[in-house]
Image (cartoon, helix red, strand yellow):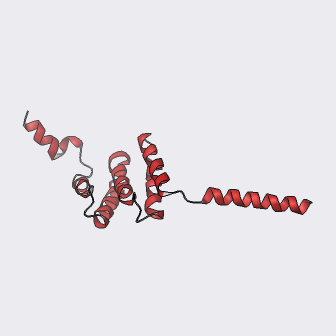
Amino acid sequence: MQRWSQFILIILLGSLFFSCSTKKEEAEYFKLAKEQYSKEAFTEAVTDFKSIIEYYPDGTHAAEATFMIGFIYANSIKDFDEAKKYYTAFIEKYPNHDLADDANYELKTLGQDINELPIFKNSENNK
């Protein structure tokens, strides 16, 4: 009887371990990342977006995840080297994506003060 109890305990512990270590579906990572971003939990959002490109590199959300990692590094975390790395990777892998122009613009203006951007300078001159 005691061996049977030990066997069941081992099975339960094993299933608990494996259920906690399994990867999530791509859509779940994407949803979590967006939720974290909206809560300004930027490091956690980056982690979830990175999980998408690690586990689902050709998935539905891989392009947007790559862009968002660059965007968060550039605009929220202010790690411009990491932002450049992800924007460059995005442009190389997704040159025809809807966000490619945005990624190129972000790269060109990386680290600049928002008030120094050409789009805002031109609007000030028109006043």
Percent position of residue 62, x then y = 39, 60
Above or below 57: residue 73: above
Residue nearest the observer in this picture, 25 or 41: 25
Q: Residue at x 24, y 48 (%)?
A: 112
Q: Residue furthest left?
A: 126
Please give the name of the residue rendered at 40% of the width and 59% of the height, measured from the top-left corner.
60
On the rendered structure, is 35 left or right of 113?
right
- Which quadrant, please, contains the N terminus? bottom right
Q: Position of residue 3 (x, y in %)?
A: 89, 63
Taking depth in this image into account, of 42 and 60 the one nearest to the observer is: 60
Residue 93 image position (x, y, % from top left): 31, 66
Q: Residue at x 46, y 54 (%)?
A: 27
Nearer-the-camera pick, 60 or 80: 60
Q: Quadrant of the C terminus?
A: top left
Picture mark count = 0
Question: Looking at the picture, how far across and down is residue 6, in whole percent?
Answer: 84, 60
Instruction: Tell whether 71 sits left or right of 9.
Output: left
Q: Residue furthest top?
A: 127
Q: Residue 46 vs residue 103: left or right?
A: right
